[in-house]
Image (cartoon, helix red, strand yellow):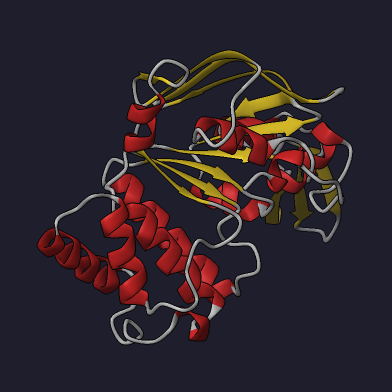
Amino acid sequence: MIKTTGLRKAYGDRLVLDGIDLDVAEGTVFALLGPNGAGKTTIVHILSTLISADDGEIHVAGHDLAGDPDSVRAAIGLTGQFSAVDNLLTGRENLRLMADLQHLGRAEGRERAAELLDRFDLVEAASKPASTYSGGMRRRLDLAMTLLGDPQVIFLDEPTTGLDPRSRHTMWGIVRDLVAGGVTVFLTTQYLDEADQLADRIAVLDHGRIVAEGTPDELKRRVPGGHVRLERADGQIQTIPHDGSVASLRELFGRLDDESVEASGLTVHAPDLDDVFFALTGHNTDTNHTDIGENVQ
């Protein structure tokens, strides 16, 4: 659904993206991780036609972005870091405005707006100005506005930043429902647990390059430090290096049985995505740099 080859972008003498290759399957969640300044938002802005690439081939939903950007725009939706909600309008008015911009007929636009208000649990707040909405409500309204055009691909650029845990989990449920309906989601996030929960595949971006890609479990297995904490029946504690896989656990159980080791407890400790991120990039996700693309409106 999304394919890029050799994607490059520079601002002056600063190279932001240095040969990015991506291949995102239809009906999946693809998460792009990286510290601030790595180029995540620049990639989203290029793929959503907001800015142009300096080099590379890009196809989105089967359309060549350089040769047919209008078809790409018709196939995608974008929920950016900064809400597109108009605070002076009610939730219903925001959706109807978006329906007009999508060139939906009056009746169809009103029907679609009503469906989305119900789907995103915004019916009671529909007649209230968006300025009165909580952060989670604003994010749900923002995503509902994105869905008015029934996109095949949705770009979610750090969609849960600043939300409380309940609102984050609500957004996760919405994303899962979208993917179950066949939508492809391209997600950027700084919450590693969010990528772990949602993503089918993850790419780690650092200094404008993809430094690793795979499923969450594949990435975790690349990082050393996994181990099993074995508590013996005599009270002794033993730590055994381990990758946490089922096959390796079976092998370990076989060894314990062969050696007649009696265990009263066993705990598996596997590296998480925090460990992966730090090992691959050398710093935490809250490193304070600015992605030049974030300033492009």
Q: Left or right: 73 with respect to 87? A: left
Image: 21 above or below 184:
above
Q: Quadrant of residue 33?
A: top right
Image: 121 above or below 183:
below
Identity of the residue drawn at 27% across and 57% down: 100
Quadrant holding the N terminus: top left
In terms of depth relative to the viewer, which is nearer, 215 or 118? 118
In terms of depth relative to the viewer, which is nearer, 106 or 236? 106
The answer to whether any part of residue 19 appears in the image is yes
Where is residue 24? Give x, y as percent: 46, 27
Q: Quadrant of residue 127?
A: bottom left
Q: Left or right: 178 with respect to 209? A: left
Identity of the residue drawn at 26% across and 46% down: 181
Image: 167 above or below 292:
below
Where is residue 260? Give x, y as percent: 69, 40
The answer to whether any part of residue 255 appears in the image is no
Q: Left or right: 65 with respect to 273? A: left
Image: 139 above or below 35:
below
Identity of the residue drawn at 59% across and 26% down: 52
